[in-house]
Image (cartoon, rainbow, N blue to C red):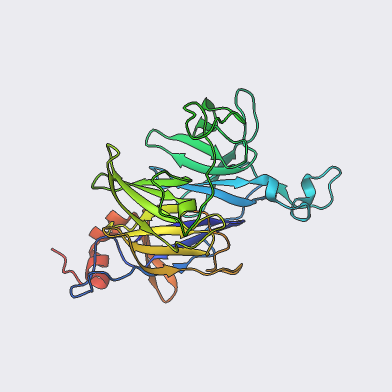
Amino acid sequence: MRSMTFGGIGTILVLIFAALEGQQAAGQASHQVPQFEPDPLWSQALPNKWVTGQVGGLAVDSHDNLWVFHRPATIPDGERGASLNPPQSECCIPAPSVLEFDTNGKFLQAWGGPGQGYEWFTSEHGIFVDARDNVWLAGSGDKDDQILKFTTQGKFLAQFGHQGKSGGSSDTQNLGGPAPYNPDAPPVQQFRLPHNVALSRDGLVYVADRVNDRIQVFKRDGTFVREGFVAPRTLLAGSASGLAFSPDQRFLYVIDGANHHVWILLRETLQVVDHIGQQGIFGGSLNVPHALALADRAYVMETGAITLSGPSAALREDHTVRDRYLGYASV
């Protein structure tokens, strides 16, 4: 079982995958679609009267911790009164832009914001934690043409590109924004806004080309393999914001902030088979979801209570889980 975390406008929502990774009862349909349910109590309250704004990005690191990249400037005055000068209320204060949580939702640390030696973003957007525990950050403002690299403790390491210096799509020194999208025109061969990238276990590179409403697949050497479209008449910000694989990698999850869905696709064909979520502000709803990530955590629940939890691989080998829940005799 894995938990899937969605970041939207001012929300962090965890959905629990309803089947243990790699274990399916005999006779199930070959394309049975995974089922999810919300876990609204996953995260603990933040310290220091902190509050978060719009969530620009999410990442899960190699330790299964969740990283959240939010936009403090989007918090209205009525929700950050304690930070105003003079203070207008006892609560609250914008949290630093980067927050880290463990698998159980416990807050671990926070850092980020303007500092010496680098150009901070006008709109916090993307975050990725690599295998060496480097934290990579990107922005989405009109002049956010740079990427920043930090340690997990927030120490600045490097900047690539410079704010407000983009020379267009041929610029090899700075990043830039997308061109307009026309759903009635033939599909273009160039990306308009590559918003997320995922690498499958069989070595294929999946790119969420958000404004083009599509997912493109490549070999590692850049050879084009296939593309698939999701809600292809979507305008606004586009329908393909983020990607994640199911535990067995049969399915590809695509988050769609314009239509407030998470689409479920067959990874092999990129065929849409289902979706979850609808627009709303209540538990289980999605309001402009923007990023998603999967954490390798399993839970066994009985009558609403969690009776067992731990890494997916460990629970798959647990004799109680195998005998009682999966129907396998212990040997």
Q: Residue furthest top?
A: 117
Q: Position of residue 143 (x, y in %)?
A: 62, 35
Q: Is residue 247 above or below residue 171?
A: below
Q: Is residue 295 visible?
A: no
Q: Position of residue 191 (x, y in %)?
A: 43, 44
> Relative to 50, is 133 on the left or the right?
left
Along the line of sight, the residue nearer the viewer: 217 or 317? 217
> Relative to 232, is 316 on the left or the right?
left
- Name the residue located 56 percent from the left edge and 33 percent from the top edge: 145
- The quarter in which the C terminus is drawn is bottom left
Along the line of sight, the residue nearer the viewer: 108 or 284? 284
- Name the residue located 69 percent from the left edge and 45 percent from the top edge: 73
How many badges with numbers are in the image?
Answer: 0
- The quarter of the picture where residue 18 lies is bottom left
Q: Is residue 178 above or below residue 325?
A: above
Along the line of sight, the residue nearer the viewer: 1 or 182? 182
Q: Residue furthest front?
A: 185
Q: Position of residue 46 (x, y in %)?
A: 62, 51
Q: Is residue 173 above or below residue 11?
A: above
Q: Is residue 129 visible?
A: yes
- Name the residue located 28 percent from the left edge and 60 percent from the top edge: 269
- The quarter in which the N terminus is drawn is bottom left
- The quarter of the picture where residue 8 lies is bottom right
> Relative to 322, is 5 on the left or the right?
right
Q: Position of residue 100 (x, y in %)?
A: 52, 44
Q: Residue furthest right?
A: 86
- Name the residue located 42 percent from the left edge and 64 percent from the top edge: 263
